Amino acid sequence: MAYWLLKSEPDVFSFADLQAAGREPWNGIRNYQARNFLRQMCPGDLGLFYHSNTQPPHIAGVLRVVSEPYPDDLQFVAASDYYDPRSSTEAPRWSMVDVEPVAAFALPVTLDDLRALPEWAESPLVRRGNRLSVMPVSEAEFRAALRAGQPAQSVD
């Protein structure tokens, strides 16, 4: 099993939105490095759902990857903000996976909280200027975030 951190702006799509949907495609990734991480995901992998562009930015809960990566349908929709005219169905540039909620955190784990955890000291997330919306996290980082966030139910 691998562990991930996936960022979303809560006014665009929040952890509560994922809980309400039950299952949702994680689409709209338009950074090649983030896309490559997404393409490494496997069903059963766990992720931390991170609310970005909010004050304070924080981890809101845990999600599970429930599909293999597949072509992001928004790259083919001309009216979409995520349309890519250089992408084709024969050679799609962008991918997505489906995710489902696992557990909400009882306590949001803020970026400042993460910076204070020794397990997160080397994470790119805690450094200034990191903009990746999908990134791997170590099992130690994942477990430290769980301890700090006290999810309402067991995660695994």
Image (cartoon, grey):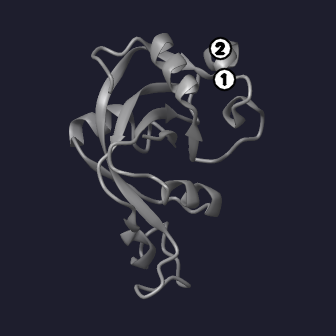
Question: In percent of the image, x 55 and y 60: which residue is there?
Answer: 35
Residue nearer the viewer, 131 or 53? 131
Please state, as top left, top right, bottom left or bottom right, where the C terminus lies in the image: top left
Question: In percent of the image, x 33 and y 43: which residue is there?
Answer: 44
Please state, as top left, top right, bottom left or bottom right, where the N terminus lies in the image: top left
**Type of amino acid under label 2:** Leu
Q: What numbered label is drawn on residue 117?
A: 2
Residue nearer the viewer, 40 or 21? 40
Percent across and percent down for residue 95 are 45, 65
Question: In percent of the image, x 39 and y 52: which residue is there?
Answer: 42
Q: Toward which corner of the image does residue 80 lie, by quadrant?
A: bottom left
Residue indicated by mark 1: 120
Pick out the residue farthest to the right: 128
Q: Is residue 77 left or right of residue 20?
A: right
For mark 2, give the secondary structure: loop
Q: Toward which corner of the image does residue 96 lie, by quadrant?
A: bottom left
Percent across and percent down for residue 18 are 30, 39
Sort mark 2 into few (<14), some (14-19) or many (20+) by Cα contacts within 10 Å: few
Sort mark 1 into few (<14), some (14-19) or many (20+) by Cα contacts within 10 Å: many
For mark 1, give the secondary structure: helix
Q: Is residue 116 left or right of residue 59?
A: right
Q: Is residue 10 above or below residue 56?
A: below
Percent across and percent down for residue 29 are 52, 59
Q: Is residue 1 above or below residue 42?
A: above
| Circle 2/circle 1 CB separation < 8 Å | yes
Quote the CA–CA distance across marks 2 and 1: 6 Å
Q: What numbered label is drawn on residue 86?
A: none
